Amino acid sequence: MTPTPQAASSRRVPLPIAPNMRDLGGLPVSGGVVRTGVVFRSASLADLADEDQRALADLGIATVYDMRTAQEQAKKPDELPVSALLVPLDVLADDQGDASIGAAIMSGHAREVADLLEEGGAAAIIGKSYRKFIRLRSAHTAYEAFFRGLANPSRRGAALFHCATGKDRTGWAAVCLLRILGAEDDVILDDYLQTNTDLMPTIQPVLDKAEADGVDPELVLPILTVHERNLAVADDEVKRVFGSFDAYLSEGLGLKDSTLEALRERFVE
């Protein structure tokens, strides 16, 4: 019998300064469920206060994978407990142009990029980003290092991975991990879309600011949220470039069967 997915509310980690943070534990996968308390996803950890850092330490988080660009990391570096190892993984190092659009909107400058978002421009920008996750060598290198790091038997404690808002670069990483572990498509999609609920307290002020500046919030919403169509774009690119998801893992990311099996052994109970 397939286990019932653990409710998103029970997986959420309530750190207001680190939105969109949740445990992947409890999600049903092939052979059981994802272990609880061993792998987390979140948005940026750049503004953690001392008590927030202690909360991360209390969760046993010992390794943090930062998937933001080098510029994002330099501008707002993670504030982590001294016990945590930071692993920078710049997914978009080879082509980070579109990342600046989301950053502009989140920082209250939607009006400056509004022309780019009209007539389906926002969806096109996000789709281009997801194709980059599949195509760029820097993305291959980053995601390979991420999965090898997770599987490494010498790594101790829990792991957390994030980007700026924890929705796209992080979202694709979570999708891939859950697929490797054998989660069904509906389970994967539900966790992916949970980001929209968890991020709303953060993005609502951004939408309000855009509207106050004369920009239709519906124009910027596709940049600030996730949609099923994003994964369809990524999967189409996987099929176009590699032929299958398994080939993407083996040929694109260079992951051996032994690494995939190590991930399953470590994260499934």
Image (cartoon, helix red, strand yellow):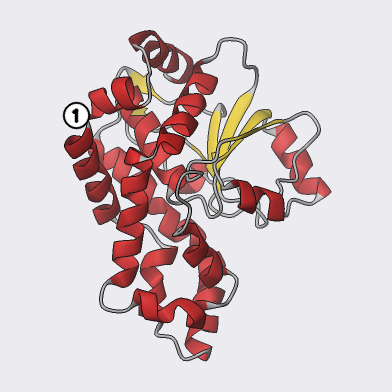
Whether residue 49 is visible here, answered yes or no, is: yes
Q: Amino acid at mark 1?
A: Ser
Classify mark 1: residues with Cα within 10 Å, few (<14), some (14-19) or many (20+). Answer: some
Q: Nearer the viewer, residue 168 or 134?
A: 134
224 on left or right of 69: left
Residue at horizontal 45 percent and vertical 51 percent from the top: 167
Q: Is residue 191 left or right of residue 92?
A: left
Element at label 1: loop
- Percent x, y of residue 136: 38, 40
**Nearest the eye: 154 or 264:** 154
Q: Looking at the image, how many numbered discs can be counted on the residues?
A: 1
Rendered view: 150 above or below 78: above
Rendered-image quadrant of the N terminus: top left
Q: Horizontal and vertical percent for residue 121? A: 31, 71
* Quadrant location, the C terminus: top left
Residue linked to disc 1:
244
Q: Viewer-proximal residue, 28 or 48? A: 48
Q: Position of residue 248 (x, y in %)?
A: 28, 28
Occupied quadrant, residue 89:
top right
Residue ID at (46%, 37%): 138
Residue 54 quadrant = top right
**Direction from residue 99 to residue 70 in the image, left or right:** right
Query: On screen, 44 above or below 136?
Result: below
Q: Position of residue 110 (x, y in %)?
A: 50, 78
* Residue sitting at x 34%, y 49%: 130
